[in-house]
Image (cartoon, rainbow, N blue to C red):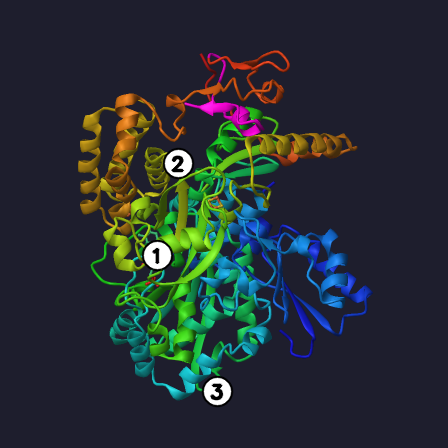
Amino acid sequence: MVDQHRINEIIDGYGADRMNALAILQDIQREYNYLPRKSLEWTAERLNVPVGEIYRMATFFTSFSLQPKGEYMCKVCMGTACHVLGGPRILEALERELGIKAGETTSDGKFSLEAVRCLGACALGPVMVVNEEPHGYMTPEKATNLIRKIASSDVEKVAAPQPASERASARPTVDLSGVPPAG
Amino acid sequence: MAEQHRADVIVSCLHGRCPDLIPALQEEIERRGLTTEVEVVESGCRGLCAMGPVILLQPEGIFYTNVQPADVPELVEETLIKGRAVPRLTYKEPLTHKDVCYYEDIPFYNKQMRHVMHKCGMINPESIAEYIALDGYQALAKALTEMSPEEIIAEVKKSGLRGRGGAGFATGRKWESTRQAEGDVRYVVANGDEGDPGAFMNRSLMEGDPHAIIEGMVIGAYAIGAHEGFIYVRDEYPLAVRNLNMAIEQAREYGLLGEDILGTGFDFDIRIVRGAGAFVCGESSALMQSVEGKVGEPRPKHYHATERGLWDKPTALNNVETWANIPLIINNGADWFASVGTERSKGTKTFCLVGQIANTGLIEVPMGITLREIVYDIGGGIPGNGDFKAVQTGGPSGGCIPADQLDLPVDYDSLIEAGSMMGSGGMIVMDNHTCMVDIARYFLDFLKEESCGKCTPCREGIRRMLEILTRITQGEGEMADLDTLEALARTVQNASLCGLGKSAPNPVLSTLHYFRDEYVAHIEEKKCPAGVCKALIEYYIIAENCTGCGLCRRKCPQQAISGEKKEPHVIDLELCIKCGICHDVCKFDAVGVR
Ligand SMILES: Cc1cc2nc3c(=O)[nH]c(=O)nc-3n(C[C@H](O)[C@H](O)[C@H](O)COP(=O)(O)O)c2cc1C
Ligand code: SF4
Ligand code: FES
């Protein structure tokens, strides 16, 4: 879970100065795959800025997320070059395959799907990136096959002794206790 | 580039795509006992991205494309030992399939003029020694020891250099105002945010030749009297951040950055700030807010940044490519620089040539070259069975230029006259499979997300225009919508605070101007001539082409296709979700769109 000691280490790496807020948030995002609420509060306190200000930064920049992300982050490029070459069709195919919309995470916490704007690899369009690894010249078919391959290779990984329970606890679930029941 | 070696094997555009190639080369070279004779150089982008990894063998100038680790033994045996080319690996013209063995004969390169990108793809960006071996940091030494700040500014002004980040403001004038502004603390900033979707020239420059940017910044800092500088880099470019950081470290070690640079008593240092994915942060005032650790929203420009920029101090902010031009101007002189280009646009410009074009990649051309030369000579034309329709420049702030303007010279003023703009260098080629209404909708959709929302005309105007365009692409538009669009566009243009809002209507206005017939087809005939807008198209099987192979039937995710083996198939339009997979997979051109 979120470790205050680790957050402090990140802050100290840059110096507790407001000017470093962006870099600090980026490192936290990288470490946890999202910005845990607590980490925002601690950062605000250490940098001596109102927590609202930090929260505003966390919501302004698109590379930050306030929700935990899936184990496999699939980013489909919707930049102009990829758009012209059929990027939207790749995204639709993955939405169909995973049963989620762009911006969502599968209920088993395995895949997150995101539409992004230009990954700077436009010459290889349409492009998608899975956990930082770029895949160029995509077609809807190639993209779904890739996802299926990852899903099936992951089954083997999970079949190994302990990880299943470990993964369950490592992946914080959204607290729904305050939400009134539907209907 | 090491002089003592007989040959260099320069490997480019790995983009992390083929991690095994360099080790394979090194291993084979060692196995054949060539280690002392041949050096392998891992280099930056050489532009021909679509055919990477590419290898240039020097001094012969033999050029190989799409090289894989399995090709290495043959490459070493044939070329490095026997001195012959491997025909299988040489460059083939995309449309004619003509074989071209030598780098300098490739049309993609020989119409280009690689000045700023000269070292990119030639040197190892991780090595300051290689940069220095190609005259690197000579301009800095000259500037700091032989020239006064005023002389430098005069030289830059005389060169006619204009900003490469978009608007094309005269760089020398900007520096002069910054130098003359009141106060004793000044800053220089390099803009490497590169938010234009469909562009990566700044990325290639930062990754492939980081020292050129640093050298330009030190010279500029000396000229305007700054002691601190910032490079703002998109977070999506981790390799650029890494290479720039490495270059900064090395420059400090060599006494080219930090205190008492080259023993002249001049102090200057640079810090890198990573952006976090907001297009508006490329705008100068938003960028500076972001460097200060605030939310990156533009500020009203009561004062110019040259007077009150970062922390309200005089600041010279330039695009990274602008900075990288500086050492060239100082080394070769303003007259040399101004000898290339047109009357009001001097020097060269890098572009990313992407989209429906045979040679996709990064190019650098003299200002004033025509679009036709770029698209047909360098770009190799349109692949497949497409017809050229338009080229989009200037990113979301730019416009689409149609086929009848292909002879337009590419310079700041001509592009603006044609309803587009230079921008930072994205150049997206579109053919008859691109719907211009959809493109306008696409850009507004992008801008809707990226508008910071501070001012109403931009925030609301973009939304309303997007709603109208979405309606049109769904076949629910009316002719009166076109007038509303135009009126809204003018308002957003005039009443927005920053450049994002002011230029947001450009994609709409330019497509309305040049491609009005496509809008009309969507509205009156309920047809999308390009076959893109889903609500207005249907897929069908062209019976005379269909061999009944059954591939589409098996691939269709909706089981919407049926038919007997060897008989023409049919698509059930009730079930079809128009994903287009059948059209992709058919080998017989038997799936049509109408
Ligand atoms: C919305 C918006 C986005 C911009 N994005 C960039 C960018 O990514 N890179 C860039 O160099 N300039 C960008 N600019 C232009 C900058 O505001 C600024 O004019 C430029 O960096 C100045 O450098 P130059 O004079 O060397 O061109 C953008 C402007 C606007 C309005
Ligand atoms: S024009 Fe748009 S992006 Fe610029 S300040 Fe106004 S709302 Fe923000
Ligand atoms: S447009 Fe997709 S990578 Fe640039």
Q: Is residue B167 above or below residue A148?
A: below
Judge if badges 2 and 1 mark residues of a common chain: yes
Report the chain holding disc 1: B
Element class at badge 2? loop
- Residue wearing tag 3: B263
Left or right: where B8 falls relative to B110: right
Whether callout 2 and callout 3 share a subunit is answered yes
Q: Amino acid at mark 2?
A: Asn
**Horizontal placement of B422 versus B487: left or right?**
right
The residues colored magenta run B574-594
Q: Nearer the viewer, residue B19 or B419?
A: B419
Give whichever of A24, B166 is nearer the camera: B166
Instruction: Give the quadrant of residue B299.
Output: bottom left
- Counting from the top left corner in percent of width and height, residue B143 is at 40, 82
Left or right for B165, reference B517: right
Kind of residue sitting beneath label 3: Gly
Q: Amino acid at mark 1?
A: Thr
Disc 2 from disc 3: Cα separation = 60 Å
Q: Which mark is drawn over residue B385?
A: none
Alpha carbon separation for disc pair 2 and 1: 21 Å
- Please give the residue where the numbered disc 2 appears in the rendered image: B432
Badge 1 and badge 3 both on one subunit: yes
User: Does any portion of residue B473 appear in the rendered image?
Assistant: yes
How many other residues sit within 10 Å of disc 3, few (<14), some (14-19) or many (≥20)?
few
Viewer-nearest residue: B263 or B104: B104
Which numbered disc, 1 or 3, marks the residue that appears first in the sequence? 3
Reply yes or no: does residue B294 show up in magenta: no
Q: Chain of mark 2?
A: B
Q: Is residue A66 visible?
A: no
Residue annotated with mark 1? B370
